[in-house]
């Protein structure tokens, strides 16, 4: 799970299965994650400052779900499935 801390480009590449700074930045923007970058080349550091949809990020990174999935419907399904007596 992505946390509020600083990541090197190699760590983010492993978490998001992407290569290159631009690919990582596009994925973070699509996942509604706010970040600050500093450095150049292999010394790039991504600092995560806000996540607007933590459930979506969890599903994509931990459950290996597609980013095209409707996470709002999945959230409701999980809520009703796990809260039934």
Image (tube, rainbow, N blue to C red):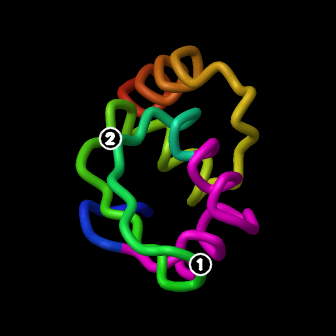
| Viewer-side residue, 47 vs 32 | 47
Q: Which residue is mark 2?
A: 51
Q: Tell me if residue 48 comes above or below residue 65 in the rendering.
A: below
The foreground one among 44 and 47 is: 44
Residue placed under numbered mark 1 in the picture: 41
Query: Which numbered circle lies on residue 60?
Result: none
- Report the quarter where the N terminus lies: bottom left
Crowding at mark 2 (Cα within 10 Å: few <14, some 14-19, many 20+): some
Quadrant of the drawing holding the C terminus: top left
Element assignment for label 1:
helix
Q: Main secondary structure of the magenta part?
A: helix
In magenta stretch: residue 14: yes
Q: Residue at x 52, y 17 (%)?
A: 72
Residue 20 on image: x %, y %: 71, 66
> Is 46 left or right of 81, judged from the image as shown?
left
> At which x and y percent is residue 59?
56, 45
Q: Residue at x 42, y 74 (%)?
A: 39
Q: Position of residue 77 (x, y in %)?
A: 54, 21
Q: Secondary structure at mark 2?
A: strand
Relative to 45, 60 lies left or right: right
Q: Would you say 23 lies left or right of 73 here?
A: right
Q: CA distance from mark 1 to mark 2?
A: 25 Å
At a point 46% along the width and 79% down the height, the residue shown is 8
Answer above or below: position of 85 versus 39: above
The picture quadrant where one finds residue 5 is: bottom left
Question: Which percent across, then down, holds residue 82?
Answer: 43, 33
Q: Magenta segment, which residues? A: 7-27
Residue 25 shown in magenta: yes
Q: Nearer the viewer, residue 7 or 74?
A: 7
Instruction: Check if mark 1's residue and mark 2's residue have beta carbons within 8 Å.
Output: no
Residue beneath the point at 39% across and 60% down: 37
Mark in front: 1 vs 2: 1
């Amino acid at each position: 799970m992505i946390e509020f801390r600083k990541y090197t480009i190699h760590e983010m590449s492993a978490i998001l299965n992407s290569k290159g700074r631009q690919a990582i930045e596009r994925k973070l923007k699509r996942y509604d994650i706010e970040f600050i970058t500093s450095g150049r080349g292999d010394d790039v550091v991504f600092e995560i400052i806000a996540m607007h949809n933590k459930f979506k990020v969890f599903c994509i990174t931990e459950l290996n779900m597609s980013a095209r999935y409707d996470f709002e419907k999945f959230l409701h399904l999980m809520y009703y499935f796990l809260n039934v007596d």
